[in-house]
Image (tube, grey):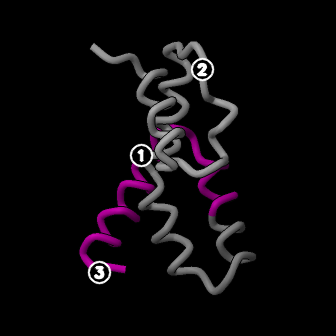
């Protein structure tokens, strides 16, 4: 079985991740690393939809700060709602 680190190295070598992840090459991964990446990537569609619904960066940052101020579960529910709306509207 291929390790996560090996998969990341392969993706970096193939140019699939761009240059911003080059520092991750050859890294020993642990559960906290995997969780951080998963937490970030799982909500990318919701934040794309939030940005698309915003009138530029300033309103987007304001909306993102409002989300950040929520407790974990209400924030997760709100992000899931945004993502569902995005799927329905196809933005």
Secondary element under disc 1, as helix, strand or loop, is helix
Which of marks 1 and 3 precedes in the sequence? 1
Residue at image location 58% in from the left, 51% down from the top: 18
Q: Is residue 14 magenta?
A: no
Q: Is residue 54 left or right of residue 23?
A: left
Which of marks 3 and 2 precedes in the sequence? 2
Q: Which residue is mark 3?
A: 89
Instruction: Point out which mark residue 20 bears.
Output: none
Residue at image location 59% in from the left, 80% down from the top: 54
| 9 shown above or below 40 | above
* Residue 35 percent coordinates (x, y): 49, 26
* Residue 66 percent coordinates (x, y): 65, 59
Which of marks 1 and 2 precedes in the sequence? 2
| 24 shown above or below 77 | above
Secondary element under disc 3, as helix, strand or loop, is helix
Residue at image location 30% in from the left, 64% down from the top: 84
Pointer 2 and pointer 1: residues touching (CB < 8 Å)?
no
Residue at image location 69% in from the left, 58% down from the top: 65
Judged from this view, the residue extending furthest toward the front is 13
On the rendered image, what quadrant is the C terminus found in? bottom left
| Residues packed near mark 1 inside 10 Å, few (<14), some (14 to 19) or many (20 plus) | few
Q: Which residue is mark 1?
A: 42
| Residues packed near mark 3 inside 10 Å, few (<14), some (14 to 19) or many (20 plus) | few
| Mark 2 vs mark 1, CA separation in Å | 24 Å
Q: Which residues are magenta?
A: 64-91
On the rendered image, what quadrant is the N terminus found in? top left
Instruction: Point out which mark residue 26 bears.
Output: 2
| Mark 3 vs mark 1, CA separation in Å | 19 Å
Front of the two marks 3 and 1: 1
């Amino acid at each position: 079985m291929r390790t996560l680190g090996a998969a990341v190295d392969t993706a970096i070598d193939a140019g699939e991740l761009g240059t911003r992840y080059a520092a991750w090459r050859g890294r020993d991964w642990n559960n906290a690393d995997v969780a951080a990446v998963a937490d970030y990537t799982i909500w990318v569609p919701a934040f794309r939809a939030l940005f698309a619904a915003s009138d530029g960066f300033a309103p987007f940052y304001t909306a993102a700060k409002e989300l950040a101020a929520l407790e974990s579960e209400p924030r997760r529910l709100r992000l899931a709602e945004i993502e569902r709306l995005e799927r329905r509207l196809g933005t």
